[in-house]
Every structure is written in structure tokens, then in C-alpha cells.
Amino acid sequence: MNVLLALWRQRQPKTGRRYVLSALGYALMLGLPVLAAQQLGHLIDALTQTANAPQILILLLAFIGAEMLANFSRLLWIRELSSFDRPLADRLRLIFLHRVIWQPEPDRLENTSVFNAHQQDTTRLTHLLLETYRVVISVAVAASALTLMVRVSVPYTLACLIPAALVPPLLSRIRRSLVDVTHQSRQTADTLSSQLQSAVQLAPQLAFTPAQAALLERYSQALTSHSNHTVKTALLQSAVEELAYRAGTVLRAGLLLLTAPAILRGEFTIGQYLIFSAYLEWLMNFPNILTAAQASWQQAQQAAVRLSATLGLAEKNALQSVVALNNAASYAQNTAASSPTLTLHNVTVANGPFKNFSAAVPAQGFTVITGPSGSGKTTLLKILAGEAGFTGELQPALHTALLHQQPTFLVGTVRDNLTLTLDLPEADIQAAWDVSGLQDDGLTLDSTQTAQQLSGGQQQRLALARTLLHGPLTLLLDSPTSALDARTEHHVVQALIRSGRNIVAATNRLMLLEQADAVVYLEAGQVLATGTHAGMMQSHARYRRHVQQETEV
């Protein structure tokens, strides 16, 4: 409940009124088709007598439109509560952008899983509210349905309700049990899979010991057994769902057979049959509505616990992170003169090109790592960023951000993805935007275009500007201009150099090699040469041949 109140307090009054109106509209539209079933039945009786088919068609289309409008309002409400520009999310983003740097985290600025999880938890709370509406309306409809059906005909009501009361709840209970079993089985399989992955990562670099091989074999057998069990349960669940569908068909057919003779004798009208059919549908679906509400309640409870824990730690973690960043900046300044390089000593990466690898990578200015495909350029960047698991030493440990070839974007506008909705100085935002060069493509910071609608090259430049905006001390780039043309590449490279950041880029592009302060040439996980591009073109034949081959391509 505290989380719900926090969500509500973060809303502006105008937005809050829109949520209330959407919810009321959804509740009204959800109950309207059934609450009006009796009037609809009488109207159809009247229209049947006059054989006015067009009016019947118009009436049915109106009810179909009401149902579509109800679903639309529901989707609108969920979208609003889970929108990207939620003010509440700012506190969460502050935690994970100003992070504690001594805690290893993959992808650094590109990790968006926490935002997606927070959005899903908010959506679960929204679903709970919607399911509560459905339960309240369904109880009212069920009561009115029973009252009206008894008024029309007690025998027909009993004949319809006895099977309807027994069959669907029984099938629903069986289905819920199967879903629980399947969920538990998948959780167990996920746990075993994680353990299997950990076992592989902890294995020796060159060979498995007999004990480790036996352990992996047991994990594999357990995973196979659980996979087979999950498949069997899924098949049984499908059979129960099919049986539930057939049971509903039998009940509807039974109602028609029961009422058809009475209709022919004039004891029962088509409108009364419609009333019975509509209310029977709701009464049969009532157990499913309660089951869905129970599931939504359980999911919402778990989501509320996660959100409460995150919000409760917000201020504490944010403060620790800011202190950590200040310490990191001070450390980098103090060690810049004495430690201008990143030193790797006896580094070994599992399933990688590096075995007892030692090197000194310049960490000041603009450094380019180049080499043939498979030489270890990307892996070396991941080591420097702390992403790749390795043995050995890396000194000093700097505050870095690694920008991958395929950056991650959240659902939102270009400005949303650039700033991550943080309250940043407008001058800094504009400076990062100028680096991207996207204004030359006709885009503006206030464009309503989403990041997903940009081309590959535009996305690459937007991700680069975003990473620069959020201030890493050392920027690691993996093929940063691979999707850019020559003119745009020149603009981006010059902007990077003017930014004054320490940049280490893995690329084979000639323009970046020529602009670099230092070049590190790799082959098969070994550093064969270090120096300037011009110097190594004269003194190192293998580097010169590599550059010529890449230029020809």
C-alpha cells in the first residue's frame, strides 16, 4: 500500500484525474454489456417481431465497440502508470547511474535491466487495481444474473447453474495446480542452469578435473529430467484447457437444446435465451476472474516488496555512490602522473585468446587497439571494464564505461535516452548532443522520434553522446564508428578528441588509427607492437600489412 501511495503522490493532479477517468471508464465499459443483457433481450424480442435486422446489427456493433473501448482504456491506463517519464524513476536511476564503482557490474551504463524490472513491477500493481475492479463488477453482475434468471424461469436456471457451478471451478483448480507445478519446475531448472553456469566459470582454464566433470554430468542429467517433466506438465495443462473449452461448448449446446422446444411452443423467447446465454457466460467465467485476481494479488505483493526495498535504500545508496565517484576522481588525478598506463600482469581469460597475458595499455589521451579478427580486441576492452572474468592483476582500476557495438535503448524519445530523464545541466546536454552530430540529420533534442526509430549509425552516435554525458573517467569504445560514413566519422572522432576524456577504442578504421595518440597492435592474444600509427607503419611490417589489408577491404 505504501508503494501505491508513493506512486500516486508522484503524479501531477492533471495526470491523476486522467487515471481516475480511465479507470471509471474501464469499469463502466466492462460491466455495461452484461448489465444491459435483460434490456438487450427484450429489445431483440421486439426487433424479431418486426424483422428489423439492420437495427439488430447496429445494436450488436455498438456492444462490440463498447468492449473495444473498455480494452483501449485499460491499455491506456497501464501505459500511463508504466510510462518512461515517471518522476519516481528518477530516484532509481540516480542509484544505478551514480553507482558504487567497486561493485562489478556488466555493461555499466548500458545495463537497463533494473529499469525494465521496475517498470514491470509497476505494471503488476496496476494489474492488481484492474483485477479488483473486475471482481467487484463480477460479484454485482453474478448477483443480478441469478436474480434475473430466477425471475424468468427457475427450472432453466437450475438446469444451467448446476453444471456451470461444478465443471468450470474444478477445471480451473486443476489448471491452477498445473501452472504452479510448471512454475516450480522452471524455477528449479533455472537454479540448476545457474549452478551449471557457475561450475563452468569456476572450472580450470585448460581442463576439467574428474570431480568437476562428474559434477557437470549430474547437473546436465538433472536439467534433462526437469525439462522432460516440464514438457509433460505443459501437455497436461493444454489438455485441461481444451477440456474446459469443450465443457463450455457442451453447456451452451445444452442450454440451446433445453430452451429450443420451449421457444417453439412459445413458452420461451429468443430474448430470454439471450439473457440466459449472456449471464451463463459470466457465471462460468466468474471462477477464472477470481483466480486471475488471486494471481495478480500475489504478483503485486512481490512487486511491492521489491519496490519498497529499492525505494528504502535510495538515499543511502545514492550518497555512498557519490562519495565513491569523488574518491575515484581523486584517485585518478593523483595517479595520472605516476601511472599513465593500465598494466595487465599474467592475465588469463577462460575460452579467450589471452593466456598469461601481460601488457601496458596507455590510459591517457586517445588510444586505439587494433588487430585481425579474433585477436582479442573486444575481450581486452571487457577486461579493462571489469566485464570479463579473468585471473591476474589489473592496475590501476579506473572508473570506466564500455560502449558496445549494439547499445541498449529504453522506450522513450531521443532526449529521454540521452539524459535518462535525469536533471542535468542544459549546457552539458547540449554539448553531448553536439558530439553526436545528429542535428546534421535534421533531428532535434525535442524530437518526438523514439530511439528505436533511428538508423544504426544514428543509434551509435546517440549512445556515444549518452555515455559521454554521464561522465566516466575512462571511455572504452568497441568499434565506435563501424556504422558511420566517412564524413560523420570524422566529425565524431574530432568531437571525442576535443572532449578531453581518456579514450581506449578497439577498431581497424584508418581514420581513428591516424588520429590516435597511441596504437596497440594485437595478434592471437599477444601485443606485437605499441607506438604511433606513423611510426609503426615504417618500423613494423606485420602492422603495415594489417593496415593495408583493412584499407583494401
Image (cartoon, rainbow, N blue to C red):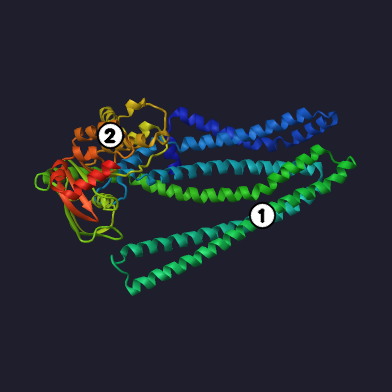
Instruction: Provide the secondary structure element on which disc 2 rests.
Output: helix
Q: Earlier in the sequence, mark 1 or mark 2?
A: 1
471 in relation to 541, above or below:
above
Give the camera-side residue of 368 and 289.
368
Q: Is residue 508 above or below residue 26?
A: below
Please state which amino acid type lies under the numbered disc 2: Glu
Q: List the single residue furthest toward the bottom.
A: 210
**Viewer-proximal residue, 100 or 4?**
100
Q: Does any portion of residue 174 appear in the rendered image? A: yes
- Residue at (36, 31) in percent of width and height: 415
Q: Viewer-nearest of labels 1 and 2?
A: 2
Q: Position of residue 60 (x, y in %)?
A: 72, 33
Horizontal and vertical percent for residue 539?
Answer: 13, 47
The residue singled out by tag 1 in the image is 242
In this rendering, would 290 be left or right of 413? right
> Alpha-carbon neighbours of circle 2 within 10 Å: few (<14), some, or many (≥20)?
many
Which secondary structure, mark 1? helix
Q: Is residue 273 above or below residue 345?
A: above
Question: Is residue 399 among what the camera can see?
Answer: no
User: Which quadrant is home to the C terminus?
Assistant: top left
**Which residue reaches farthest right?**
265
**517, 157: nearer the viewer:** 517
Q: How many marks?
A: 2
Amino acid, disc 1: Glu
- Residue 356: quarter of image: bottom left
Give how far across and how far down residue 487 sits, in percent.
Answer: 28, 30
Residue with the mark numbered 2: 489
149 with respect to 129 (left or right)? right
**Residue located at (34% from left, 39% from top):** 91
Task: Check contact, mark 1 vs mark 2: CB within 8 A.
Answer: no
* Residue 104 falls left or right of residue 459: left
